[in-house]
Image: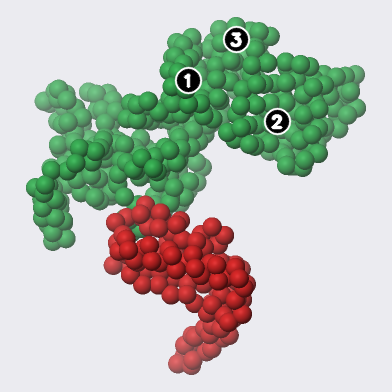
Chain colours: A red, B green
Amino acid sequence: MRYLLLIGGEDTGTTGSSDQTSKDVCDAADAMAWAEEMTRRRVLLTGEVLRPPSDATTVRVRDGEVLLADGPFAETKEQMGGFSVIECANLDEALEIAASHPVARYGMVEVRPIWD
Amino acid sequence: MSKAVAAAFRDEWGQVVATLIGVTGDWDLAEECAQDAFATAMDRWPRDGVPRKPGAWLTTTARNRALDRLRRDAVGAAKLRELAATDTGPGEPPEEIQDDRLRLIFTCCHPALGFEARVALTLRTLAGLTTAEIARAFVVPEATMAQRLVRAKRKIRNAGIPYRVPPAELLPERVNAILGVLYLLFNEGYAASEGTNLVRQNLSAEAIRLGRALVSLLPGEPEVEGLLALMVLHDARRAARVSPSGSLVTLEEQDRSRWSAAGIAAGLSLLETALRRGAPGPYQVQAAIAACHASAPTAAATDWAQIASLYGELSKFVPSPVVALNRAVAVAMADGPAAGLAIVDGLAASGELTGYHLLPATRADLLRRLARHAEAADAYREAIELTTSEPERRYLSGRLAEVSGS
């Protein structure tokens, strides 16, 4: 089965931006190591780190009119900072992989099955 | 004859459904075919007699029914070919041979499901309660309960929750999840007083039945045995818990001759088996506390010092202020109300139990025993304000009148 891992942390406004703190750099190294390990295990199909929600634009079309809004569609404290698509046998395996992601230790990882 | 079917239903429902899920991978189909098989039994057994192995008969009947239905539609036929292919595949390693009922209970209690969903699913698929019965037991509309079950089954399918006994590294956590569900079921039933609906009281019996099954499916797990011991010991006191007028009777005032001696003996022996394994845990400690109460010939003969020390043990496993409050009560019984009050006042000062009615109720009781009547009255009033239970309010009001009158 394929699962989307939504990697979420508290929005500090620094995720993926140029003004990275030393903590972000350290996290990036951890995340890189995780991605390498998951690639080696042949479970990681793809994944990306995202620019912060403040760089997002939300698009809606109503009555043929394109409506734009600055920011993400969910105004919550926790924001998606990246995602991965994994392929594994079942939910238990997906949960184990999600739990091993470095961000899970302070942020959170949502495990969402992909509609196959 | 319908008695034979009813007995078979109670004993075999979980096994039949579990096997059918294993064969078809389809929870709804499994339940429907199990139901069909029991209906067929209702019809045939009076005529042909009860089969020698009712469980095997029911499973075969349900299985044939499922295969028939799968053959009839295209998707099902494809699924059957798939099953046939895996059936004839290379022999599975021996550790893959798992009891279907055990796989079912682990899946129903998977922590990725909401707690309410786990409880409902366990009652429906393992215990065979109808959706209407479960709804009545938890006092929710039947449609709500039906929706809860549909969602849970959908998540199992769509999220890929595996139908299996989890591997060793996940086992302790997953067994714990099952024990949590069983203990909740037991307590829901135990707290139901006489006169509330019977389905609800039945939950305790179901929890004990499932606990017994789990002990035989997972032999040698001390916490599983500990929980069963705890439930059996509580259940042994059931008859004495309610007065003829229907109100709850405190442990202290219960007529101990109405306790089930056989139940207590069974509980004590289960607990002994568990403790001998040398791996104590919270359920075993709670069972040990229940055992202290159950083996005291009179309320006055209760070994409160031992109970106080067991609550101390329990708080190491479950660091909760409620456990600390229980310990305070035991200390008050062992060493006098002043010693207990010191602990209660410490808890009150920490603010962790603010709004919990048993905190002022306990304080009130200790102050009353210390003859500090004015303070006791204040605490009783606070407790009365906080409690939502009518019998409890009556009890506390009685005590308030007592300390105010003197």
Where residue B160 appears, x then y in whole percent? 32, 56
- Mark before the other along the chain sequence, 2 or 1: 1
The residue under label 3 is B296
Asked whether the beta carbons under mark 1 and mark 3 sit within 8 Å of each other, the answer is no
Residue B121 visible somewhere in the drawing:
no
The crowd level at tag 3 (other Cα within 10 Å; few <14, some 14-19, many 20+) is: few
Pointer 3 and pointer 2 on the same chain:
yes
Q: Residue at x 79, y 22 (%)?
A: B339
Instruction: Give the amino acid at mark 3.
Output: Ala
Examine the image and state in which quarter residue B307 appears.
top right
Where residue B282 appears, x then y in whole percent? 54, 30
Measure the alpha-carbon separation of dots 1 and 3. Answer: 20 Å
Question: On the rendered structure, is A39 left or right of B358?
Answer: left
Q: Residue at x 68, y 27 (%)?
A: B326
Q: Residue at x 17, y 47 (%)?
A: B66
The residue under label 2 is B325
Q: Nearer the viewer, residue B354 or B374?
A: B354
Instruction: Give the amino acid at mark 2.
Output: Leu
Instruction: Name the subunit of mark 2.
Output: B
The residue under label 1 is B275
Instruction: Name the subunit of mark 3.
Output: B
Measure the alpha-carbon separation of dots 3 and 2. Answer: 22 Å
Which of the two marks, 1 or 3, is nearer to us in this view?
Answer: 1
Q: Nearer the viewer, residue B141 or B272?
A: B272
Asked whether the beta carbons under mark 2 and mark 1 sit within 8 Å of each other, the answer is no
The correct choice, above or below, for B352 with respect to B252 in the image is below
Instruction: Give the amino acid at mark 1.
Output: Leu
Question: On the rendered structure, is A71 left or right of B305?
Answer: left
